[in-house]
Amino acid sequence: MTRISIGLVALVLAASPAHGQHVSPYADLTGRDIKALSPEQIAQLRAGEGMGLALAAELNRYPGPLHALELADSLRLSADQTAAIQGVERAMRAVAIELGGVLIARERALDRLFADGGADSATVRGLALEIGRLQGELRSAHLEAHVAVTRLLTPDQRHRYQVARGYAAHGAGHAH
């Protein structure tokens, strides 16, 4: 019995990190070009993608432009509606791409500031606040596009959207 206990203790000690060593969950991120952004996030920002920024709208019955266009047939969009939604999507994407580019540049500047050892409170604060403002503007652009699309659709089309996206049952009532 003692040999088994000693063997188990030795096995556990061998498998655990060295005493006092605490591997950070961020250890694998040290090689990123911009530490705060993954390559996928950078690509999404450059493409003007939603990145979940409009979930407050999407999940509360405010259809998004891209998905409304993807569902044009099942929503039975008119030609005028399709053109208007395409305009909303183009305008939103243009703003999102522009803001995404600036956001990437500011995140890169913040990263460089720390990497070069030149971080000071005033500069860090200024960049962090600017990044927060840009993130807010980006989110607002996506949310506002959902508001615009909702106004272009009939209650029946909004319900069809909810059903097609899996948010509502086919026979459920037409809330909102």
Image (cartoon, rainbow, N blue to C red):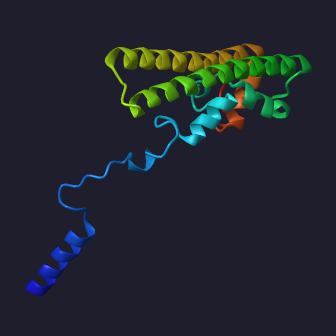
Question: What x and y, as percent, mark residue 5?
Answer: 13, 80
What's the residue at 75%, 17% (across, down)? Answer: 91
Quadrant the N terminus occupies: bottom left
Q: How many marks?
A: 0
Report the front residue among 4 and 99: 99
Report the front residue among 159 and 145: 145
Quadrant of the image occupied by residue 98: top right
Q: Residue furthest right?
A: 79
What's the residue at 42%, 27% (across, down)? Answer: 113
What's the residue at 69%, 35% (across, down)? Answer: 163
Residue 96 left/right relative to 52: right
Quadrant the C terminus occupies: top right
Question: What x and y, as percent, mark residue 63?
Answer: 68, 25
What's the residue at 30%, 52% (across, down)? Answer: 23
**Residue 176 visible in the displayed image:** no
Residue 51 left/right relative to 159: left
**Residue 106 visible in the displayed image:** yes
Q: Is residue 71 above or below residue 90?
A: below
Quadrant of the image occupied by residue 99: top right
Q: Is residue 90 above or below residue 66?
A: above
Quadrant of the image occupied by residue 30: top left
Residue 47 left/right relative to 87: left
Question: What x and y, as percent, mark residue 123?
Answer: 39, 16
Report the front residue among 63 and 39: 39
Question: What x and y, as percent, mark residue 94?
Answer: 73, 20
Q: Residue furthest left?
A: 2
Report the front residue among 85 and 136: 136
